[in-house]
Image (cartoon, grey):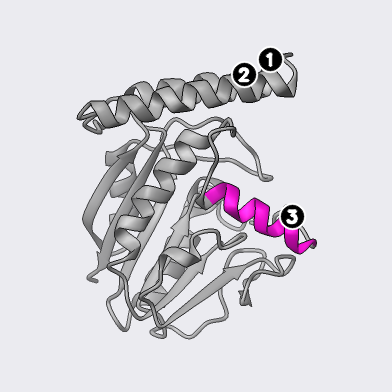
Amino acid sequence: MGGRRGRSLMTGIMYPQDPLILADRIASRIHPKRSQFDYIILKDLSTTIARYAEKIYGTVLDYGCGLKPYVELFYRVKEYIGADFSNNPRADIHFDDMGRIPYTAGNCDTVVSFQVLEHVPDVDVYLSECRRLLQRNKGMLLLTTHGIWEYHPGPGDFLRWTHEGLIYTINRFGFRQCAIEPITTGIRSLFQIVLTRVERKATLSRKYKIFLYRGVNVLADRLKRSQKNEERFYDFPICYLYLGKLEL
């Protein structure tokens, strides 16, 4: 299963208990504000996921669901099930510390995975579970993960991909690629990297940081609207979206 066989996926992520904090955290992911330093990537992720979510039906399992920030986008589905570690109160079912899910194969039509794969120390275990869950129905896998995004352990941050590497990694498990999209490229990618650097390293006050974020994010949106801004795989994509159908 590869050199990382047997390594635990157990996370130390803390989940907010206050309903207001929880709602604000979710909103900042799916409806980011221009005052956020990560507005560009979160806006592009939400917009891209939404285009695919509206075409998905049946039962969906969110593998590594976190706060389930994108659940509202899947308004056509019959059931949306979140799976995560036992310390996540937002999860409907819990998996063990290796990421194995106590869920009967064939009961879901689509597995979704949003910004999870880069945090998985044993990708083979994770993708094998995706295949098992979808085996009976020959279902779909909708997944987003990182291209050139910053290192951010939660607690682990193990992998980055090119689009070819991501396709190769997933297709080894019997999936056929239906779509692959780079997310946040070109000038938007550059702006996002700069704002992330400001957030992490700059000694500016919060007031001036927010002022800067709003100005740059407005400019990024205007440039996207006024240009074709074709998303190129070689143009420094921060993330990718992969859609595949299980065939084997």
Please tell me which of labels 3 and 2 falls first in the chain.
Answer: 3
Instruction: Please tell me how many numbered marks the rendered image carries.
Output: 3
Q: CA distance from mark 1 to mark 3?
A: 26 Å
Q: Position of residue 92 (x, y in %)?
A: 61, 77
Bounds of the magenta segment: 18-29
Seen from the viewer's position, the closer of residues 172 and 190 is: 190
Q: Amino acid at mark 3?
A: Ile
Q: Main secondary structure of the magenta part?
A: helix
Q: Is residue 28 magenta?
A: yes
- 9 up-or-down from 42: above or below: below
Q: Is residue 33 left or right of residue 54?
A: right
Q: Amino acid at mark 2?
A: Val
- Are dots 2 and 1 in contact, CB under 8 Å? yes
Q: Amino acid at mark 1?
A: Ala
Q: Secondary structure at mark 1?
A: loop
Q: CA distance from mark 3 to mark 2?
A: 24 Å
Quarter holding the C terminus is bottom left
- Are dots 1 and 3 in contact, CB under 8 Å? no
Q: Residue furthest right?
A: 18
Kindly identify the residue that appears in the image at 66 percent across and 58 percent down. 23
Kindly identify the residue that appears in the image at 51 percent across and 36 percent down. 39
Q: CA distance from mark 2 to mark 1?
A: 5 Å
Q: Which residue is mark 1?
A: 202
Q: Which residue is mark 2?
A: 198
- 111 up-or-down from 70: above or below: below
Q: Which residue is mark 3?
A: 21
- 59 up-or-down from 3: above or below: below
Q: Is residue 82 left or right of residue 46?
A: right
Please tell me which of labels 1 and 3 falls first in the chain.
Answer: 3
Q: Secondary structure at mark 2?
A: helix
Kindly identify the residue that appears in the image at 61 percent across and 63 percent down. 98
